Each structure stands twice: as C-alpha cells, then as structure tokens.
Amino acid sequence: MTAEAKLSFNDYSRPAQDSLTDFASFFQRNVLNGVSQAEAKLNEIEFNPQPKPKSDTPQSLAHAFGRVGYYGSFVYSSEDPTAIALKKFSESEEKIGDLKLKFDSEAVEKFHKKLASLTIKLSESNSFRRHVLATRLSYDASRASFKSSKPEKVDEAKAKMEQAEDAFVKAVDDSMAKMKSITENRDFLPALADLVAIQLSYFKSAHEILAELS
C-alpha cells in the first residue's frame, strides 16, 4: 500500500449516507417549522434547477458547509435575503473546499513524501545500532572465551576474538558513515519551507474568499 493510500486528509467524516432529507428536515424543524412548506420548496429543485455542489459526498468540511447552504437556500423563496446569502455562502465554501483538496495534494507531494523518505532512513539507523550492539556482544563473548580458554585452545580462541573484533570495528565504521549521511541530509528543510508556503497560500486564499463573502 502506498503512503498516499494510507493517509486521509479529509477533515469531514460524516457518513456517505447524508441525504437531502437530512438537511431539509433540519431547516424544517429549526427555521420554518412547517414540513409541507419545506417539502414544496425542495420539490421545486427538479423544475427550477440551480448549480449544485460538485458532489453529494462532501470531500472536505468546507464542501459539507457548501452542501448545507445550497440545499438550505431552497427552503426560502429565491428572492429572500436568507436564500441569497445561503447560496453565496455555498459558493464560497465550495471554493474553499477545492482549495483544501489542492492543499492536501501539494502537502503530500512536496512535504509528506520527503518526510516519509527521511523516516525510512531514520528507521534504518535503528537497524545499524542494533547491528553494532550485536557485534559488540559477540566480541565481548569471544574475548571472555579467550581469557578463560585452556592452553591448547588459546590460538583458536584468539583467532575468533580477533575476527569478532574486526566485525565490531567494521560495524561501527559502517554505522557512523550511514548516520552521517542522514544527519547531513538537508532535504527536510526545503520541504518544511514548502509546507509553510502551501499553508500560507491556502489560508490567504480562504481568507480573501471569506472576507469578500463577509
């Protein structure tokens, strides 16, 4: 499974079975308090179509807000100030939702992938340390064996100790070289700067949309 497949940046987790009835019922109960009147307004949608949200399954919280505003506007007459406000609100939230999806995509491409690569390297560094520890324990064991070996076994024990020592020294040198390559890697800082720039662009654009709507 790819890193992108494992991640979910959706800030809206309402189940997909959201329906027009959910929102209609809300506005009926809380705004008009009249079921028949709300249903009549909602039925007009088929005969007087308006630009609809891009998806009935919101892809972000802003898209969900846009969907509520869109369907809520039909509870009122088309000239009612509340209907006009809700439609404008819906359009603005749709734009912000699209910006959010763009933000998510760019954040994955420019930041998360590089962070994932660094994480893999850091994980590999743990295996380097474990290998160093294992060779050190092997060296200590062979050295202890050499010190306690019988005279006729001294040469053999010494050879094993020296072999274990060479393996330990090599493991330390290899680990240090690999760790140095990780610590000298500067790819993360540009990626972090990219993430900040992506956030700045998203929040600035969203602010402009909301400021105009306000």
Image (spheres, rainbow, N blue to C red):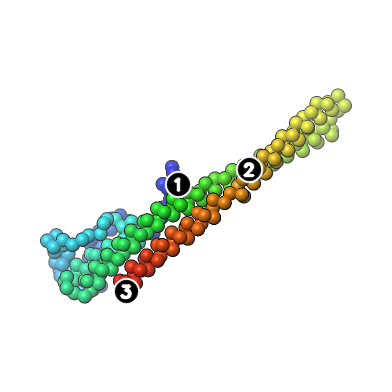
Q: Residue furthest bottom?
A: 81
* Tag of residue 89: none
User: Furthest residue to the left?
Assistant: 47
- Quadrant for the C terminus in the image: bottom left
Quarter residue 99 falls in = bottom left
Residue 47 image position (x, y, % from top left): 12, 61
Residue under the image location 21 percent in, 71 percent down: 83
Viewer-side label of 1, 3: 3
The amino acid pointed to by label 3 is Ser
* Residue at the spot 67% in from the left edge and 44% down from the top edge: 176
The local crowd at label 2, few if under 14, some if 14 to 19, many if 20 or more residues have their Cα within 10 Å, is some
Which residue is disc 3 drawn over?
214
Q: Mark 3 Cα within 10 Å, few/some/many (few <14, many 20+)?
A: few
Spatial distance from mark 1 to mark 2, Cα to Cα?
24 Å
Expressed as whole percent of the image width and height from the top left, the position of residue 210 reads 34, 70
Please name the residue that numbered disc 1 is placed on: 3
Tag 3, which secondary structure?
loop
Where is mark 2, residue-wise? 178
Q: CA distance from mark 2 to mark 3?
A: 55 Å
Front position in the image: 174 or 127: 174
Q: Quadrant of the N terminus?
A: top left
Q: Are marks 2 and 3 in contact (CB under 8 Å)?
A: no
Left or right of 12 in this view: 129: right
Marks 1 and 3, Cα distance to the nearest angstrom? 39 Å
- The amino acid marked with disc number 1 is Ala
- Give the camera-side residue of 162 and 35: 162
Q: Amino acid at mark 2?
A: Lys
